[in-house]
Image (cartoon, rainbow, N blue to C red):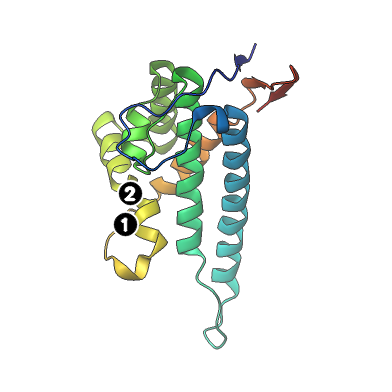
Amino acid sequence: MPRKFIPQAPRQCENCNRTDCEFSLSDFTGEKIARECKTYYDLFLELEQRSRLVQLVHDGEEYEPNLMGPAIVIGSLSAELSLKLLIFIEKGQFDCIHDLEKLFYNLPDNDLNELSTRLRTEVHLDDNSLRACIKQIAHNFEFWRYFFQADVGGITHFFPKFVHIVCDYALSGKYSFVKEDGSEIQF
């Protein structure tokens, strides 16, 4: 049976140092996070596929857009939203950060254990390697938005697998959201 999230009264983010933020969690419900996550994940899947096709047909004569950077940015954002969704469902709040490592290790224990197990198993990593890989991709969203400005950024075989495993898990249909009118939406 899916876990249900019922939006609660408005709350400001805890431990937030922003003084000009009008953000309240009632305005940004789990349903909206899930919809955005699904949208960005679907776009990542399209960019990932299109990027592969461009590499296969590129003849060097004609300009082809390099879709790797946009795919990494969109993939990072979809993973970030997936992690925030899982945290929000359990804790009712999340940190307003882009750091995938901090978000991953701030997951509720059951989600952290399940995702860690899946990542170690499907990517064939031990605990230390998993930590190192997550650390390497932690700031991909920030690094790859303007990749021409930075020499660093974590792109390895691990990154797309991380995005797929985290997003598929968060959007697996095991959560449902009760809207204000009492109707339910399942993701």
The C terminus sits in image quarter: top right
- What residue sits 47% from the left and 21% below the top? 92
- What residue sits 46% from the left and 55% below the top? 73
* Residue denoted by label 1: 153
* Residue denoted by label 2: 139
Secondary structure of the residue carrying numbered label 1: loop
Kind of residue at disc 2: His
Seen from the viewer's position, the closer of residues 154 and 13 is 13
Image position of 179 with respect to 148: above or below: above
Q: Position of residue 78 (x, y in %)?
A: 51, 44
Q: Position of residue 110 (x, y in %)?
A: 43, 16
Secondary structure of the residue carrying numbered label 2: loop
Q: Is residue 166 left or right of residue 7?
A: left
Q: Is residue 186 left or right of residue 30?
A: right
Q: Position of residue 104 (x, y in %)?
A: 37, 32
- What residue sits 39% from the left and 45% below the top? 158
Q: Please identify, in this view, whether the residue under mark 2 or under mark 1 is nearer the observer.
A: 2
Label 1: how many Cα within 10 Å (few below 14, some 14–19, many 20+): some
Are the two marked residues, 2 and 1, in contact with CB atoms closer than 8 angstroms? yes
Does residue 46 appear in this view? yes
Picture mark count:
2
